[in-house]
Image: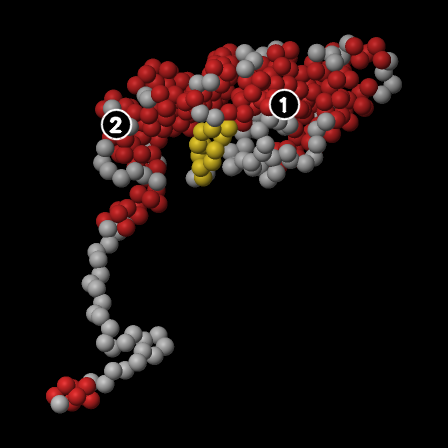
Amino acid sequence: MMQQQQQQQEPWVPAGQGLRPTKSAPCSPLKPAPASMLRTHSDSFHVAHKVPVGDTPYVRAKRVQLVDKDPEKAIALFWGAINAGDRVDSALKDMAIVMKQQNRAEEAIEAIKSLRSRCSDQAQESLDNILLDLYKRCGRLDDQISLLKHKLQLIHQGVAFNGKRTKTARSQGRKFQVTLEQEATRLLGNLGWALMQKENYTEAEGAYRRALLIGPDNNKMCNLGICLLKQGRVLEAKDVLKQVRPAAVDGLRGADSHLKAYERAQEMLRDLEAKLVGRPRADQLDTSWLFDALLLGSSSSIWQPQPCMDHLLPPRSQPRRRASTSLMRTPV
């Protein structure tokens, strides 16, 4: 009887739409969020300014570099971090970059050379890339050529990228994979440009041809045309320039630079044709007059070799070429 009265006093109510039954089990207490999910004001500051968390010598140097924006003081603090053994790989690379920005490239070169022995094996490749940029900034072509050949030799020996076929690169906050073939063609393009500055057109031609075996590139084709013309091979130069295509072979990656190189090739061809009109064929065997005319003309800037364009956006996947493997086995 008592149970029937209680049931009459507390009737069960069916669940309506969006409602839970009144007789359901009570909710479990909320679990505290893990500490890794709780972002404090300090954490937000570090994320916004890309400053690592902590109060070590390296962190203090990064704070001065990125937040206080005092490069000279940051350089001194990076030195201190290196001497303290705190994140030496990052400290040396960051210090060299800040030195370059402060027009202290020669000091940065000497710092890397004297301190890189303290860095890990994994950091050596990045330090080489910074050195290449510094050598180029200082006009140290012989050092640049020597280091480029050394890096190509590492690919030939199979020890580049720590023996792997790809490496992870970072640009503008994005990570992407770079293949050995892409690295080889980049290095060969830079080598060709440096050799052209030394007026070593025969060896520069070889570097560009090997790079083009890996994959087409309009900028390298234009520079190859200049190499051939400098050697008096006008007809070959024209044939090479005619192979430059307006479409970017890499899709969206580097499309703008490919288009500019194509337009440059067309202007070079028009320049050549205009200078050769009415000239006897024998003149095409002795082109000293021709190149002087081109360099002294109004469009002389197009006849200057252009540096290799490093496309830093994630590359579009392409089928691997067999030719690239044999190419990298050819010593530089």
The picture quadrant where one finds residue 321 is: top right
Mark 2 neighbour class, 10 Å CA radius: few under 14, some 14 to 19, many 20 or more: some
Q: Position of residue 33 (x, y in %)?
A: 24, 54
Q: Quadrant of the N terminus?
A: bottom left
Label 1, secondary structure: give it. helix
Residue 121 falls left or right of residue 176: left
| Amino acid of disc 2 | Asp
Which residue bears the numbered disc 1? 212
Q: Nearer the viewer, residue 184 or 260?
A: 184
Look at the image and tell me whether residue 126 can be seen: yes
Q: Residue furthest left?
A: 2
In the displayed structure image, the side of residue 63 where residue 131 appears, left or right: right
Helix, strand or loop for disc 2:
loop
Q: Are marks 1 and 2 in contact (CB under 8 Å)?
A: no
Indicate left or right for 295 with 98 as reference.
right
Residue ID at (58%, 34%): 318
The numbered dot on residue 115 is none
Is residue 300 shown left or right of residue 321? right
Q: Residue at (78%, 17%) from the top-left corner?
A: 235
Q: Circle 1: is it few (<14), some (14-19), or many (20+) Cα within 10 Å? A: some
Q: Which residue is mark 2?
A: 86
